[in-house]
Image: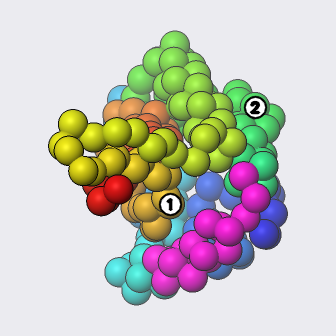
Amino acid sequence: MRELPRLGGDGWELLYLDGEWETREDRLAVEDPYEREELVSVSAASEETVDEAYEVAAEAQTEWEEAPPQERAAVIQNALEVIEERHEELVELLAREAGGTRLKAEVELDTATGMMELAASFPLDSPGQHDRSVTPGKENIVKREPVGVVGVISPWNFPFHLSMRARSRRRWRSATQWS
């Protein structure tokens, strides 16, 4: 499994596609809604770019699903280390991007990393459960299976928190089978 490269320099203007940080000619301005000043200009992802990212992620899904649980947990732990190393920068960015306060940004970062810490434990949890059903002749099997590629469009007001919440929740698929 590839190690996610860390951003060099400012790096916020780049798109991460198929293991590479890329820039695009089409740009979007990110404004501080309070000051109404441009914070940064970022590469705009086109519909084709999103399709490409989806295809690459879908291809990687098989490898991800077959990776040992400790390796999947380590990916999230590595992301948490990057967040810790860049804590001050992220707090500043979250506050300015949302036109909020430092306190709000600290709370957002804290809740998001808390969800990530919990999510890092999921690969090591029991793979599922097997219970009797209330329906005679049937049993309930709950299995944890990767849901595949998930896209998140996050609102501006709590972007990091809401993106992590969308990604960190347990995804359980239950099936009722004959015993």
* Residue 68 place in picture, x, y as percent: 76, 58
Query: Height in image: 47 above or below 76?
Result: below
Query: Height in image: 162 above or below 58?
Result: above
* Residue 110 place in picture, x, y as percent: 58, 22
Q: Is residue 58 visible?
A: yes
Q: Residue furthest front?
A: 137
Sort mark 2 into few (<14), some (14-19) or many (20+) by Cα contacts within 10 Å. Answer: some
- The answer to whether 120 appears left or right of 98 in the picture is right
* Residue 174 place in picture, x, y as percent: 34, 51
Look at the image and say whether residue 50 sits in the magenta stretch.
no
* Residue 133 place in picture, x, y as percent: 27, 40
Q: Which residues are magenta?
A: 53-69
Sort mark 1 into few (<14), some (14-19) or many (20+) by Cα contacts within 10 Å. Answer: some
Residue drawn 20% across the image and 44% down it: 136
Q: How is the image coloured?
A: rainbow
Q: Which residue is mark 2?
A: 84
> What secondary structure characterizes most of the magenta part?
helix
Residue drawn 35% across the image and 81% down it: 47
Q: Is residue 154 visible?
A: no
Residue drawn 60% across the image and 76% down it: 62
Residue type, numbered disc 1: Pro
Look at the image and say whether residue 63 sits in the magenta stretch.
yes
Residue type, numbered disc 2: Glu
Task: Classify mark 1: helix, strand or loop.
Answer: loop
Alpha carbons under labels 1 and 2: distance apart: 27 Å
Quick one: 159 or 67, which is closer to the camera? 67
**Which tag, 1 or 2, sits closer to the chain's start?**
2
Residue drawn 48% across the image and 42% down it: 129
Query: Height in image: 171 above or below 91?
Result: below
Q: Which residue is mark 1?
A: 146
